[in-house]
Amino acid sequence: MTLASNVETHFFADDGIVPNNPTLPLVLYRGALGEEGDLAARCEAMFDANGWPGAWRNGIYAHHHYHSTAHEVLGIARGSARVRLGGENGATVELRTGDVVVIPAGVAHKRKSATSDLLVIGSYPTGQRPDICQAEAAAHDRSAANVARVPLPASDPVTGDAGPLLDCWRAAGSL
């Protein structure tokens, strides 16, 4: 299968508490890392080489949160997790070993459950610094204004070029 055939997109509407992203979908690459070898090191090297440097290793928070000042990429290096995306009105998605998900600024995410061996590699595009916002109405308007100012990244964290991510995001932004 080609990478393009393994790409899923998900749009999430602003719910008044979580701004989500009015123009950019979440992009999920199924199996982008493969399933064998040191997937964590492969993921870190891939993100760094493709303009998403400074990767961290951890999991996914068990509460709704989002970043209003940066896009985020998560690579599942080991294990699996059920993740609620887009806030309480969003969707639950199963992320498995080898998957990579690019979460646009403003889109909430929360771990609902995970295997005990879950290892997530995360990063942000060059020049973007993430904040951590809670899903609460009081922060909504300020966060939505921040989200609107976050630029597109220079490259796709998986392919390194415009790839499926920027092609999809540019097409969505022109609607």
Image: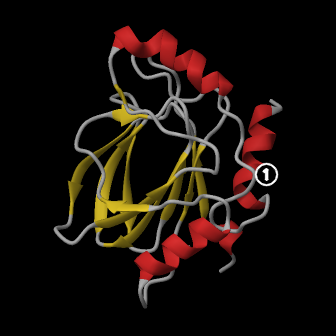
Q: Position of residue 88 (x, y in %)?
A: 33, 29
Mark 1, residue position: 167
Snapshot quadrant of residue 160: bottom right
Q: How many marks?
A: 1
Q: Secondary structure at mark 1?
A: helix
Task: Tell me the quarter of the image containing the C terminus.
Answer: top right
Q: Nearer the viewer, residue 116 or 175?
A: 116
Amino acid marked by disc 1: Asp
Query: How crowded is the residue under tag 1: few (<14 C-alpha within 10 Å), some, or many (20+)?
Result: few
Q: Position of residue 64 (x, y in %)?
A: 31, 34
Task: Tell me the quarter of the image containing the N terminus.
Answer: bottom right
In the image, 140: left or right of 65? Answer: right
Q: Which residue is painted at 67% across and 60% down in the image?
A: 51
Q: Which residue is painted at 48% across and 35% down in the image?
A: 107
Snapshot quadrant of residue 69: top right
In the image, 58: left or right of 155? Answer: left
Q: Which residue is painted at 32% across and 17% down in the image?
A: 136
Residue 6 visible in this rendered orientation of the protein: no
Q: Nearer the viewer, residue 9 or 109?
A: 109
Q: Nearer the viewer, residue 15 or 137?
A: 137
In the rendered view, would you say 25 is above or below 124?
A: above
Q: Which residue is painted at 58% across and 29% down in the image?
A: 21
